[in-house]
Amino acid sequence: SAPRFALGSPILGFRRRLIARSPGRPMTTAPFPSGATGDRSSRRPHRRWVARWMAVAPRPRARRCPTSPCRSRRCPSWTPARPRRHPAEARLEAEGAGEMFRVTTLPMDKLPKTEDGQIDFKKDFFGKSTNLTVSGQLEAELAALALSQVYTFGPTFRAENSNTSRHLAEFWMIEPEVAFADLNDNMDLAEGLLKYCIGQVIEHCAEDLEFLESRLLDEEKQKPQNERSEMSLREKLQFCLNNDFQRLTYTEAIDILKNSTPNKKGKFNYPIEAWGADLQSEHERYLVEKHFGKPVILTDYPKAIKAFYMRVNDDNNTVRAMDILFPGIGEIVGGSQREERLDVLMGRMQEMHIPLEEMEWFLDTRRFGTCPHAGFGLGFERLVQFVTGMSNIRDVIPFPRFPGSAEF
């Protein structure tokens, strides 16, 4: 039967090995290129994942990570796809936004040029234009198709010129990726992981929470009455544990926001006028803090405002995406069911002007056999910010790096 999760453990009820015979979860196959199976060549490393030795080799490594956020005694079969490693270099930003840091060893005072006057990246360290990764998701998809359920946990870099209390230029991301999972499984997994982490803090950090709650109360006294939180820190955490997250579609959320009092009175900085608007933090917090009064999971966003790899719905206007919104934070998790159909994926990439030749390795995962799969990214510092009640994300990472500041 189709796998389902039991909330309360971090990695929620999957069997160690999911099988392709699961009803409703077909696995597509195609002949693999001659000589490519188990290819250990450094030129085609993505093809190694079809070989048994590549599926077996990471398991001993995984056993050396007993404190992983995605492993527990109840479900020990998750494999880290890149534990304790330096950030990967990537030429394509996974979310399509394009705000990336460039990696180069070229001399800035004497850049090599091509005949047409462009920078000659062939003389750079990697032989091509290279950037710091913003996500390990695309690579994790390769590993998930070999190992069933994997995660990455490492530093992530985004070059957004943002100075809000929720953004950093360098932060850590937990990114599970699961084979034979759909959007509902993905939502169950993410909600269960968040509840497990919060529950562990409540159970084992009572003294710390008492101090943080007292500190937050003193901070709240400096705010106007209408801006103060209605619940104490521990009440807020317990409330998240005791209540199911509210689930609704983007379309339903837009209807709520269009008819809301702040929108009608022009109090939103970004008024909601029509379907297709990209929701801002003020909209997310209204849904969570004012309308529903609990965490919210939004699904089925317009495909025009989401990434190319998200599975397109039958209406051809929306994708199987989901965001989890928390009080005081806004978006804390973003994820989706991945597009496993090769023709649809290539069509989406062409719509978004993503060069197919640079993504041939990713297309190979669909071209030569795949299955439905899903995953998400959880910003670790945003989770810590929520659990501790700190007002600024820069206070929950030892050495914050943000626009204009890289002192350490």
Image (cartoon, rainbow, N blue to C red):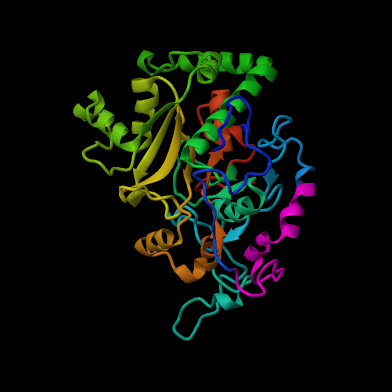
Closer-to-camera residue (237/55): 55
Image coordinates for residue 195, horizontal then vertical, percent: 57, 25
Closer-to-camera residue (26/235): 26
Q: Is residue 121 above or below residue 382?
A: below
Image coordinates for residue 193, horizontal then vertical, percent: 59, 31
Q: Is residue 321 magenta?
A: no
Q: Residue furthest bottom?
A: 115
The image shows a total of numbered marks equal to 0
Q: Is residue 78 above or below residue 369?
A: above
Q: Is residue 363 left or right of residue 155?
A: left
Residue sitting at 35 percent across and 15 percent down?
226
Q: Is residue 56 left or right of residue 206?
A: right
Q: Is residue 141 above or below residue 192?
A: below
Image coordinates for residue 322, horizontal then vertical, percent: 44, 39
Q: Is residue 54 magenta?
A: yes
Residue sitting at 46 percent across and 49 percent down?
160
Magenta part of the chain: 32-61
Q: Quadrant of residue 251?
A: top left
Q: Is residue 138 above or below residue 24?
A: below
Residue 172 visible in the picture: no
Q: Is residue 234 left or right of residue 205?
A: left
Closer-to-camera residue (103/364): 364
Residue 4 visible in the picture: yes
Residue sitting at 55 percent across and 55 percent down?
138
Image coordinates for residue 112, horizontal then vertical, percent: 55, 79
In the rendered image, which quarter contains the N terminus? Answer: top right
